[in-house]
Image (cartoon, helix red, strand yellow):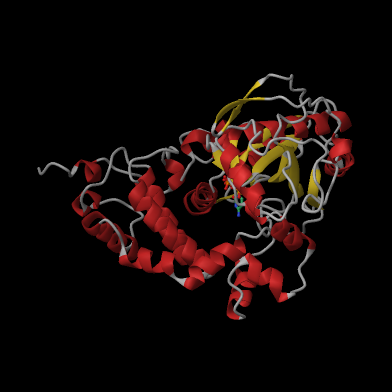
Amino acid sequence: EKPGLELAVVSVPSYACQRHTPLLHHNTTLTDALSILAENAELGENEGRGVAFRRAAALLKSLPQEVRGAEQLRGLPCLGEHSLRVIKEVLEDGVSHEVETTTHSEQFKAMKALTGIFGVGAKTADRWFREGIHTPSDLQRSGHTLNRAQRAGLQYYDELNLPVTKPEAVAIGQIVERAVHAVLPGAEITLIGGFRRGKQTGHDVDFLITHPDEGREEGLMRKVVSWLEAQGFLLYQKTTGNSYLESKEGPARPASNMDRFERCFSIFRLRTDNEGREIQTGTEIQTGDGSQTYSPTLTNTDPHTHSDTHPHTKTDSHPLPQTLVVVGDHAQKVSWVLGHSQCSGPRSWRAVRVDLVVSPYSQFAFALLGWTGSKLFERELRRWAVHEKAMTLSSHALYDRKRTQYLRASSEEEIFAHLGLEYIPPCDRNA
Ligand code: DCP
Ligand code: MG
C-alpha cells in the first residue's frame, strides 16, 4: 500500500451532518478556491452548482489532515467532476485558472460589491450590473429609488462590511438582554449563528429569544424593538410577525425554514467606547495600535443623548480620539472607516447587523438547531431527514412521515437522536 492513501481508507460519510467539521481545518487553500466558485454560482443564481461546490468544500473541511495529492481523494464522497478538477489544479499549480478568472472578473467583483449592500440580493444586483452600475458609489449616483433597507445599507456600507468581532457580539448581547428583560423578565436569550459555532467574527449577530412559560413570548418582538428604539440603539429595523399559526402548509412544511417566527432584521448603533460603561480618566484602553491612556471624561451612560440618527452630518458630543475603540483588533479598521466616510468628525459608535428571532418554548430546540448553522449543515440535516429517514425537519418541528406524527424534543441532542444521527456539537457544524 502506497503512503498517502490513508484518507481514502478511512470511510467518510457523505452527509455533512454525519461528520465533525471544525472551524479550523487542514485544507483552507482548497476550500477557499471552491468557496469562490460556490459564491460565483450563487451570485449567478445557480443554486445547484453552488451547493455542489459547498459540499465538496465541506468534505475537505472535515478531513483529519492536509490533502497533498489527488490520489488521496479516491473513494471520498461529495467530490464531483468539476470540484475534483479544481482541486487537482490547485494541488498541482497552486492556483486554479477558473478561480483566478472569477475573482478578477468585473461581473463577480460588481456582484459582490452590490450584494454587499444590506437589502440587495442577487437579482437586483444583476439588474443594476447590466445597467452599468458596478459599485455602491455608482448606485448612489444613479438616482435609483431605493427601499428603506437599501438606503440604510448604502449609508452604513463600509461598517456593515467590517467583520463583527466576538467582543462586539457580546456587547450587543448585553443590550439585547437589557431590552428583553425590561419587557419580559424570565425570558431567555441565546447567541446563535456563527458565533455559537465558535467563529471569532461574523457578518452579523444572531439571537434567539424564548420564555419558559409557553405563550408569554407572544408579541415580545414588538416590545423589545420599541424599547431598543426608545433607547436609541436602532439605526434600522424591520420586524416580521409570526406567520406560523396562519400557515396552511402545516408546521413542518414552511415555504422556507426561516420565515415563520417573529423576526427582526436590524442595524444596531453600537458604542465603541465600551458600550456606555463609565470609563475612568486614566484607564488603559486597548486599541489596535497598542493601549492608550484615556483622558477626556466620559460619564454619560444615557443613550438618549446619543440618539443622533444622522451620524454623517453631525459630530458626537464627546470629542473622543478616533482610535479610541476598546474592541481590540478592529480599532484600526474602524478608524479607517471613520476617516473615509463622509462623517464630519470622529464618532464613538459603529453600525452592526443584528438578527433577532423569537420562538415559543416548545419549538426552542428546533429553532436553536435551525439557526445555529452553518447554512450547508442545515441543508444537509434536512436532506438527511427526508431521504434517509422519511422525516421533515424545520426550525419549528420534526415530522415522521411513516408514523404520521410530530416528534417532540427539548434539546438538540434529542433531535439528532430522533434523526438517527450522532450528536454533533455546534463547534463541529462548520460545514
Ligand atoms: N440560516 C439558514 N439558511 C439561510 C439563512 C440562515 O439555515 N438561508 C441559518 C443558519 C445560519 C443562521 O441561520 O447559521 C444565521 O444566518 P447567518 O446568515 O447570520 O449565518 P452565520 O451566522 O452562520 O454566518 P455569519 O458569521 O456570516 O453571520
Ligand atoms: Mg450570523
Q: Which quadrant holds residue 301?
A: top right
Residue 404 appearing in the image: no
Quadrant where the N terminus is found in the figure:
top left
Q: As drawn, which residue projects farthest toward the left?
A: 1
| Residue 299 figure quarter | top right
Residue at 88 percent across and 40 percent down: it is 223
Position above or below: 156 against 294: below
Q: Is residue 406 left or right of residue 7?
A: right
Q: How many marks?
A: 0
Q: Could you tell me which residue is drawn at 41 percent across and 59 percent down?
A: 53
Q: Check the image and name the residue furthest to the bottom.
A: 131
Query: In front here: 23 or 246?
Result: 23
Taking 277 as reference, is 27 above or below it? below
- The front one of 296 and 338 is 296
| Apparent side of residue 161 relative to residue 102 in the rendered image (left or right) | right
Left or right: 351 in relation to 1: right
User: Residue 246: percent from the left, percent from the top?
Assistant: 82, 55
Image x and y of residue 170, in percent: 66, 31
Measured as percent of width and height from the top left, residue 274 is found at 70, 29
Observer-nearest of 26 and 271: 271
Of residues 284 and 155, the one nearer the viewer is 284
Q: In the rendered view, tell whether residue 96 sits above or below residue 160.
A: below
Residue 321 x %, y % = 69, 36
Query: What residue is shown at x 43% (from left), y 64% (from top)?
Result: 103
In this picture, residue 61 sits left or right of residue 88: right
Whether residue 212 appears in this view of the structure is yes
